[in-house]
Amino acid sequence: MTAALDEAFSIDPLLSDEERAWAAKARAFATERILPTIEQDFEDKHFRTEFVAELGALGFLGMHLDDEGCAGAGAVGYGVVCHELEAADSGWRTFVSVQGSLAMSAISKFGSDDQKHQWLPPMARGEKIGCFALTEPTGGSDPAAMDTTARRDGDDWIITGRKRWIGLAAIADIAVVWAATEDGIRGFLVPTGTRGFTATKIDGKLSMRASIQCDVELDAVRLPASAMLPGAHGLSGPFSCLNEARYGIVWGAMGAARSCLEVSIERATHREVFGRPIGANQLIQEKLANMLVEYEKGMLLALHLGRLKERGALTPTQISVGKLNSVREAIAIAREARTILGGDGITSEFPVMRHMNNLESVRTYEGTDEIHTLVLGRALTGLAAFA
Ligand code: TGC
């Protein structure tokens, strides 16, 4: 962090020693491993598979879980790791979210002892990769309308349907697939080598280029009865996993914002126009001040939600406040940063446009701005405006 930003605001004094240690580990990984190549990886659409085991060795995968092989960290510890990784690139925070908050959380919350024992330790080590298949090609906002079905054939299950925007599916070993049954929506653990399972990378993305999102086809995939997650009944199952991922975004998006603010401060104090640093101009100072105010507010909100989560008191409505605010303000900060950088702001010499483009995905996945706005509207009025 630039010294000026650190002096103006740092969350460190509000963290425990253990939380600061998690943040330091994540910042070191981001600085030494992600940042040296991220601009080229984004350009080349390259996901560095070799980082997966390294993230596992650092304890970041499923780090908030208390299960076998998982670090059992607190919510704020997990949050600061998301923050540091997304300060480098949203794609790497997304990887940790999909693996830990979605796939591993689903197994941890709803899996049998055998399923947990089989999958969680190797997933925590980064030896196995998981994905979470909920969203379908017809849209992500209304999972209740899903077309994917699971029907009984003797003791087996036959799953048929299509999923879209599924992070990591093409490199995953195991997919958590949500499907409609006669008994409502249920979750299934589908080894990706199973006949009838196909994952195809989505190309042409101008966002999240250093990470992988896929179309998934399930063509009469046959699974044994033991593939079902026994503890998940209905949509509250996948939604409770989405809560975990949305919580990580509250911290993560502010990491991208911090990166944009840092580069703006650096530019404002070093770039000279009209014979003096542009940061001597009131208009630039106002932009920087507004960026700082929103960054500080966003971080304090993230910390507040994290402390509530640690007490078991965090509600989905509060998570919607955090997800909506963090991503919206991070995008606004990135846009202001671009103006401070002038024409250079559109180049890959600086991280701003990459963050801005990535944040457009973050704004849409795990509940769009519109959905979170309507969740808050319902909380305030008691009236649902979804349909
Ligand atoms: P409704 O159908 O009435 O409720 C269904 C059940 O779910 C419960 N529920 C929740 N439970 C826990 N946490 C939450 N946040 C929950 N929200 C709803 C609800 O209580 C009910 O339980 P039960 O036991 O009574 O059956 O749904 P609703 O009216 O409550 O919700 C409507 C709405 C629009 C808020 C919801 O459908 C919603 O959140 N939609 C957005 C879904 C979304 O975020 N989709 C994007 C997923 S991102 C993705 O799939 C990609 S994964 C990332 C990657 O792979 O990269």
Image (cartoon, rainbow, N blue to C red):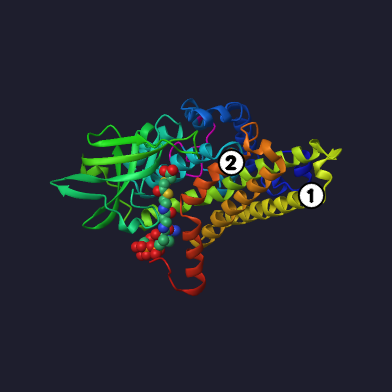
Query: Whole-percent x and y of residue 241?
Result: 42, 51
The answer to which image quadrant residue 344 occupies is top right
Residue at (29, 35) in percent of width and height: 198
Main secondary structure found in the magenta portion: loop
One can see residue 106 in this view? yes
- Give the SS element for disc 1: helix
Residue 139 numbered mark, or none: none
As measured in the structure, the alpha-carbon distance from the residue carrying label 1 to the one carrying label 2 is: 22 Å
Q: Which residues are magenta?
A: 57-69
Q: Quadrant of the C terminus?
A: bottom left
Query: Whole-percent x and y of residue 172?
Result: 37, 34
Name the N-terminal-most of marks 1 and 2: 1
The number of numbered badges drawn on the structure is 2
- Give the SS element for disc 2: helix
Residue at (36, 33) in percent of width and height: 170
Q: Amino acid at mark 1?
A: Gln
Mark 1 closeness class: few <14, some 14–19, many ≥20 residues within 10 Å: some
Given residues 157 and 13, the one toward you in this image is 157
Q: Quadrant of the N terminus?
A: top right
Q: Which residue is mark 1?
A: 285
